[in-house]
Structure formats: structure tokens, C-alpha cells
Amino acid sequence: MLKSKSKIAVQVTQGGHGADDAIVLGESVLKHHKIPSGTPIALRFGSYRTAVRVVSGGKGDTMRLPSALARSLGIHGAVSLRLHFRPSTQTLSLGPLIGVLVSRDYPQQPDRPFGSITMFCRELVDACAAQGAHVYFFTPEAAGPGPRIDGWVHGDGGWRKASLPVPDVVNNRLTARKLENRPSVQQLFREAKSRYGTQVFNEKFLDKHEVFDALGKDPSLGKYLPESRLLKSFADLKTVSSRHATVFLKPVRGSLGKGIIKASRMEGEGILATYTAPTGIRRQAYPTLAKFYGSLGGKMKTVRYQLQQGLTLIDIGKRPVDFRALVQRSGTGAWIVTSVVARTAGSNHFVSNLARGGTLSRVKEAVGRSSLAPGYKAGASAKLEKAALDIAKGIEERIPAHFGELGIDLAMDTGGRVWLLEVNSKPSKNDNTPLEGGKIRPSVRNMIQYARYLAGFQ
């Protein structure tokens, strides 16, 4: 990585202040970075390249860009950026330029162009301003083969559409597989990587079977994995059910607890199935395991299920408790635990998702009130953090895709053992929010630091 990067205030000068290819840099900046003045050099910003001349601007430590050049860069007002100069190629690089790919926009709502995630997007803008980066937001409709993308930028007090270069880094925040699998989106990822060296992170959804299958090949991670397999036949269900009094059937591509079925053995051969529903839970008794399996016939035509061992989780007043860890890459590329929160299921649910009436609390508070054996309570937080880091590293090593953040759902049994429930490569910006206040959350700050690391602007 290149060293000696610095943040600089960039201003746009309106016409009549010199040539369109001349940028003005303060003398201290020129000296610090050993940038030659008066001779042509290359300017790079994301995928954009052009020849410019650098002119000394006296004692200040700002950069002034002519308005025509600023428009080509996609900059429409004062911003803070980082710069570095590479003498061997005579290239002055500005950045990082970060593109966030979101599912949809609402141009008819200029104050809330991204609906419910507009505040998160604004938080990213503020984090970039603080760290010296430029961010824009775009949708799959804007993904195309060209060297520019129509995106949204924030400045001068509001949101506006602009044409921008392909970014140094793309954070894929698409929330639907259908959008992610569009040929135009996949082509953008391929071309941006190969042609411009763009780094794309959180580039794909994970499904439950893929995660458990990959992690199961690592002996050191086996201790976190409940028995789990893809439900392909009655024999699969019979095998797992013979070993565990309760099993869960989880849609391989499900989210928010939708469609999960809990199957518990009753006296004799009977099975009590409990289904998640928008209003709570629904129960149905079946005389045999075979009858229960037969009831799944219609569902299994459209849904693939991951069959998973039922666990005796800690609870608070008979409401199960699990944990969501947000694990991110830092400004050095290393995995770090940003937050772990406890989630307690709603009174009429067996899943803890907030969308289904679950509540958030701090780990220490939830563990203290829970059914966890007293001797294990003091070390619970450290155990959860270690498990989250181990699992994130396992995903990195065993699944061929680039992830910058992961939501890792963990559980703990009454004997203090930590279990993996699932891994989400598109963690919600509500479900995993650290409970401490503050304008720019650590999760947002970390994302920008990692983008800077990827783009070489530390």
C-alpha cells in the first residue's frame, strides 16, 4: 500500500479562473507529496483518467478544480478527498470514490430518495466527509457497460442525480437475489473489476446450506455447528429426527425468520409442528413423522429446506435468546467485532427477529437475566466474540467471494456452548445497530475505513 496520504479540501472554481486542465494546489501540498508544477501529469479519480497541469496556489493547503474538470469527476461542490502522487507514473490519484449499490430509489421524493434507508445513506455521506472520501448511490437500473454511472450525490443541502466515474470500491447493499442476479449487475461487477480494478464487497448473498457445508469442512469450526443438512428426502428427516427431540426446517434462502418450521417429537410417534406466521405461531400435530413429511410436499416444490438440530437455548421467561454479531473488516483489512447484541423472541414466537416482535438488549444484561448456568455468565461475551471472528475468517477462507461485513447469528445453550444459527451477507442497518448513540455509528465508520484500505487511501 502507498503511504503518505493526506486529506485535502477540494473547491470548485467557476469559469474565468485559468485553463480547464489546470488544478491549483497549495505550496505545502506540492512539497509534501513532491508533485511537480507546470508539467503535465495524469489525474485519476475512480475510473476517470485525464491529463492535467498543476499550478502552485501559494500558502494554502487546498485544491481548486476548474468547474468543467470537476463536472467530469462528478464533483459539484466543496468536498474533502485524500490524494497520493506516484512519481514513477506521474499520476495524482484522488479518492477514494465509493459507490453504494442500493435496491431502489424514489426520484419523486427528493428528501427521501432511498426510502427507509435514506438516513443510513446520509450517515455514509457524513462519514465520508469526515474521512476524506466521496460516496454516491446507484441502483441496478444505472448498471451498464459504460465507464460512467448515473448516481445520487449529496451536497449543497440536498440530494441530486449526477454522472460519475465507476468507483474504486462498490459496497453491494442489494436486498433481493433477483436484483443481484440481473445480467446488467453481474456485467458491471465483472467489467469494473477487470477494466478498472474496482473492488466489490458483499458481492453475493449466502444461503444456509452453502455456509454450513463450507464451514463443516474446517475441523476447528465444527464445535459451533449444529447437525445440519439439506432436506432432500424422508431419509434425511428420519436420520436427524432420530438423534434430536426437536429439529428446525429453515428455508435455504429465507430471511427475517420467514417460513421456519419447528418439529418436536411427542409421545409415541407423533410430531408437533410449529410454524411462523405474521400474527404469531401456528401449531399442527401429526400422528407420524411420515405424515409430517408428507405435509411438506407442496412447499418443497418451491422451497429448499436446511434441516437443523434443535438446540436447548438459554431463555428469559421461556422466551429464547440469541445473539447478532456484526463483524466487519477494519482499516487494515482485519476482521473485527463491531457489535454484539442480544435478541429475545417475542412472547408468541420462537424466532427472535425484530420484525416478529423480538427485542434488543445488551449481551451482559440478557445473559444476566437468562437461564444460562451461573458459572458461564462472566465469560459469555468473550465466547460470542471469539466465535463470530472464527466464523467470519472461515467464510473468508472457504467461500470464494469478497465480504466486508457479515451479520452472524449465534446462540448459546444452558451449558455455555456457542452455536452458529446463520450468516447474513447483507446485514440490516437496524437489526445490528450498536445500542450506544452517536451521529456516525462505528459500523458506518468502519465501512469507510475498509473502503479506503481497499482503494489504497489509508
Image (cartoon, rainbow, N blue to C red):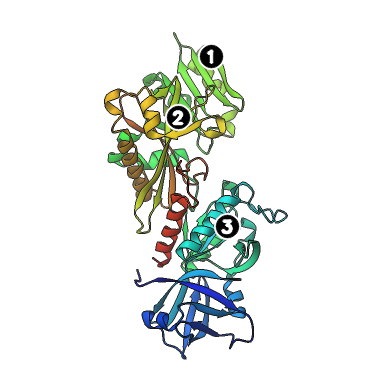
Vertical placement of residue 51 versus 106, above or below? below
Is the C-beta separation of discs 3 and 1 under 8 Å?
A: no
For this orientation, the residue located farthest to the right is 108
Distance between mark 1 and mark 2 Cα atoms = 18 Å
Label whose residue precedes the other's in the sequence (1 or 2): 1
Q: Amino acid at mark 2?
A: Leu
Distance between mark 3 and mark 1 Cα atoms = 45 Å
Q: Secondary structure at mark 2?
A: strand
Q: Position of residue 405 (x, y in %)?
A: 43, 49
For this orientation, the residue located farthest to the bottom is 38
Q: Residue at x 47, y 30 (%)?
A: 231
Q: Nearer the viewer, residue 432 or 237?
A: 432
For this orientation, the residue located farthest to the top is 268
Q: Secondary structure at mark 3?
A: helix
Q: Which residue is mark 3?
A: 185
Q: Secondary structure at mark 1?
A: strand
Q: Which residue is mark 2?
A: 307
Residue 286's tag is 1
Query: For the residue carrying disc 3, how many other residues have a C-alpha within 10 Å: few (<14), some (14-19), or many (20+)?
Result: some
Q: Amino acid at mark 1?
A: Tyr
Distance between mark 3 and mark 2 Cα atoms = 32 Å
Is 377 displayed left or right of 266 in the figure? left
Is the C-beta separation of discs 1 and 2 under 8 Å?
A: no
